[in-house]
Amino acid sequence: MKVCLDTCVLYPTVMREVLLGVAAQGLFEPLWSERILGEWSRAAAKLGPAGQVQADTEIAMVSARWPKAKVVPPAGLLDRLWLPDANDVHVLAAAIAGHADVIITMNTKDFPRNILAEEGLSRSDPDDFLVGLYAAEPAAVTRAVSDVHAEANRLTGDVWDVRKLMKKARLPRLGKKLTSS
């Protein structure tokens, strides 16, 4: 399954790491465009120069890890597309260009299902998407979350409760599934 990741799911670190950890487990193929990655970098720049440097380093790392993830929409594609927020049309174009099955975004109102269906696409928020993958492949999702959890503990020097970490990452249903199994 090919999945286009919107900037809003790439920029929060824990959410991104869980999604890409699941991708690394082979459960989906991530897709993005240069513009999506650029938005990530610009959003991180609001934290200051160090934020942008960190984001640019992480962008280089994910680009190296998934060299086929970057798609380039063909000329004219953006001109024929429409979404309620014109600033999101490039995400739809990237999904179409990459032959994605689904767009993962927190901005569900900006990606109406009927418009996506016309292009053979659906959308999901990251929590629902990951809960669905957990239902199909619990061991793989658990491994990915365990790796992110261990790294969060290492980086912060704290011992995070998995459920609280997932809630903080806006993945509360996934956290509940992981801790109630």
Image (spheres, rainbow, N blue to C red):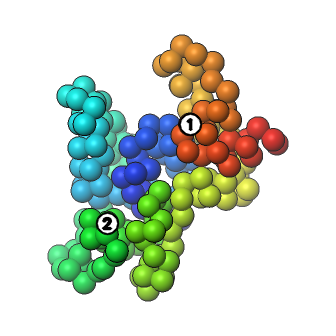
Q: Is residue 33 above or below residue 79?
A: above
The percent coordinates of residue 141 (x first, y second) are 65, 45
Question: Which of these two is toward me, 126 or 148?
Answer: 126
- Whether tag 2 and tag 1 are in contact, CB under 8 A, the answer is no
Q: Is residue 78 left or right of residue 169?
A: left
Q: Is residue 167 left or right of residue 83?
A: right
Q: Quadrant of residue 93?
A: bottom left
The percent coordinates of residue 23 (x first, y second) are 52, 50
Q: Residue at x 47, y 57 (%)?
A: 106
Question: Which amino acid, by three-letter code, is at mark 2?
Answer: Asp
From where the camera sits, is residue 126 visible?
A: yes
The percent coordinates of residue 94 (x first, y second) are 32, 67
Question: SS at mark 1?
Answer: helix
From where the camera sits, is residue 140 visible?
A: no
Q: Which residue is mark 2?
A: 88
Q: Residue at x 24, y 56 (%)?
A: 35
Specify the quadrant that holds the C terminus.
Answer: top right
Q: Is residue 18 above or below residue 119?
A: above
The percent coordinates of residue 97 (x first, y second) are 32, 72
Q: Which residue is mark 1?
A: 168
Q: Is residue 181 left or right of residue 3?
A: right
